[in-house]
Image (tube, rainbow, N blue to C red):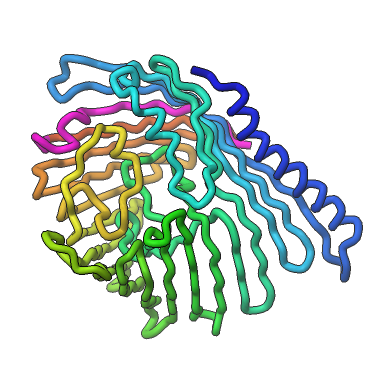
């Protein structure tokens, strides 16, 4: 049911933060030193996305609709400081929700140190959720950058699978979340040169063993960007390497991370490797193609329901299969029309995933997007019940 008290209390956090930071921005603008000025920026979008889900036998269809609102705010302050608050509200109707009474608890879960996710409506096929996925203070000065709070720490290099992303993995199947999740963390960067840097990041947890801490060193050698990573990932040691460069005009990227359990428990594999390698190429006619192969050495079969497909997985078990091959192509047919197709094969799960899409710019800030997701095969897997889904999204950006 709708909990208005909880809704306004939780959203009050955003309102108070916005008012406080706005006041700080105005004050800083009035008293800024050395000619520095403060500025406030707000942007976001409102997105309506009706859809239909069809079972694998094409004998039954379920209709749903979602209204998605996002708000991004940033206050640029003197002395190299910035305050950022970003979040989203979603109102979903899907008759399937009545068959999953625990869905509200599932959507209400927040993996961060702070609980900034909540469900304010759960009744029948209706579900309303809000989430703050960015809430941080950023400081930049000379070669230093420090960021504290909920943020995105993106160490991945590939387009699809990122085993180097110890802090912020995401789901390839969640196309409606381009911003991707954030983590409650402290991140310190020191740029030792134009193409090299040292990073230290720490993501505390309510339970110490679930914390993540890591060191990254990145540099450029032979026209390739290289990075090495060493850290602690949820009671596992982690060592990683990644690169990004080109071969014969084609982009060549790869990343791999080796995970090792600190405790040796019986009937559990102590170490595993997750690695991905990819190529990308832009043809003269504007067609952009990607090919990527993933080896997921930490694969463990997943149970649950189809809604888990859009949930981020851990970097030490980053896909619903041990192997994955992804091919993707996109092409701009005109300045306002762009189309694409993604195909992912999961051979050990006997599953193939297709996702054609088209995006049309109706006006300057008004876009129409059509996306379909089709799962074929995969009997006795999570994909078996997924069937196919077809989405139409209308988005106004401001």
Identity of the residue drawn at 31% across and 50% down: 313
Identity of the residue drawn at 49% across and 17% down: 1
Compared to 21, does 385 lie above or below?
Answer: above
Identity of the residue drawn at 90% across and 56% down: 30
> What percent of the width, then of the height, locates residue 332?
40, 44
Identity of the residue drawn at 72% across and 67% down: 80
> What percent of the width, then of the height, locates residue 299?
18, 54
Check residue 136 for magenta coloring.
no
Query: How many marks on residues?
Result: 0
Q: Is residue 79 left or right of residue 157?
A: right
Q: Residue furthest right?
A: 30
Snapshot quadrant of residue 351: top left
> What percent of the width, then of the height, locates residue 275?
23, 65
Q: Looking at the image, which is closer to me, 252 or 110?
A: 110
Q: Is residue 366 visible?
A: no
* Span highlighted in magenta in the image: 377-398
Snapshot quadrant of residue 248: bottom left
Snapshot quadrant of residue 7: top right
Q: Looking at the image, which is closer to me, 196 or 259?
A: 259
Q: Is residue 133 visible?
A: yes
Check residue 386 for magenta coloring.
yes
From the image, which quarter does the C terminus lie in? top right
């Amino acid at each position: 049911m709708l909990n208005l008290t909880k809704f306004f209390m939780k959203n009050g956090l955003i309102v108070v933060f916005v008012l406080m930071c706005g006041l700080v921005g105005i004050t800083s603008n009035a008293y800024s030193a050395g000619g520095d000025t403060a500025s406030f920026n707000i942007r976001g979008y409102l997105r309506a996305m009706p859809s239909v889900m069809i079972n694998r036998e094409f004998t039954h269809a379920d209709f749903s609709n979602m209204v998605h609102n996002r708000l991004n705010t940033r206050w640029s302050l003197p002395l190299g400081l910035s305050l950022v608050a970003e979040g989203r509200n979603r109102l979903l109707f899907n008759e399937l929700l009545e068959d999953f009474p625990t869905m509200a608890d599932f959507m209400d879960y927040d993996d961060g140190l702070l609980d900034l996710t909540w469900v304010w409506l759960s009744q029948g096929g209706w579900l309303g959720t809000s989430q703050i996925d960015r809430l941080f203070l950023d400081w930049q000065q000379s070669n230093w950058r420090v960021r504290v709070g909920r943020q995105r720490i993106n160490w991945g290099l590939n387009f699809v699978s990122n085993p180097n992303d110890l802090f912020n993995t995401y789901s390839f199947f969640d196309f409606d979340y381009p911003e991707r999740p954030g983590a409650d963390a402290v991140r310190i960067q020191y740029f030792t040169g134009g193409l090299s840097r040292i990073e230290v990041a720490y993501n505390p947890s309510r339970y110490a063993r679930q914390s993540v801490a890591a060191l990254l060193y990145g540099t450029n050698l032979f026209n390739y960007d290289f990075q090495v990573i060493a850290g602690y990932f949820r009671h596992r040691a982690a060592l990683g390497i990644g690169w990004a460069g080109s071969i014969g005009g084609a982009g060549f990227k790869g990343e791999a991370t080796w995970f090792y359990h600190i405790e040796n428990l019986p009937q559990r594999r102590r170490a595993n490797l997750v690695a991905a390698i990819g190529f990308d190429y832009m043809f003269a006619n504007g067609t952009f193609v990607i090919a990527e192969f993933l080896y997921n050495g930490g694969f463990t079969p997943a149970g649950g329901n189809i809604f888990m497909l859009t949930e981020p997985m851990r970097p030490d078990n980053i896909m619903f299969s041990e192997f994955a091959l992804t091919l993707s192509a996109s092409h701009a047919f005109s300045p306002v029309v762009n189309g694409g197709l993604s195909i992912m094969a999961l051979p050990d799960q006997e599953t193939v995933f297709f996702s054609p899409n088209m995006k049309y710019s109706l006006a300057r800030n008004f876009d129409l997007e059509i996306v379909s997701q089709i799962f074929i095969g995969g009997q006795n897997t999570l994909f078996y019940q997924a069937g196919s889904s077809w989405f139409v999204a209308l988005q106004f950006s401001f």
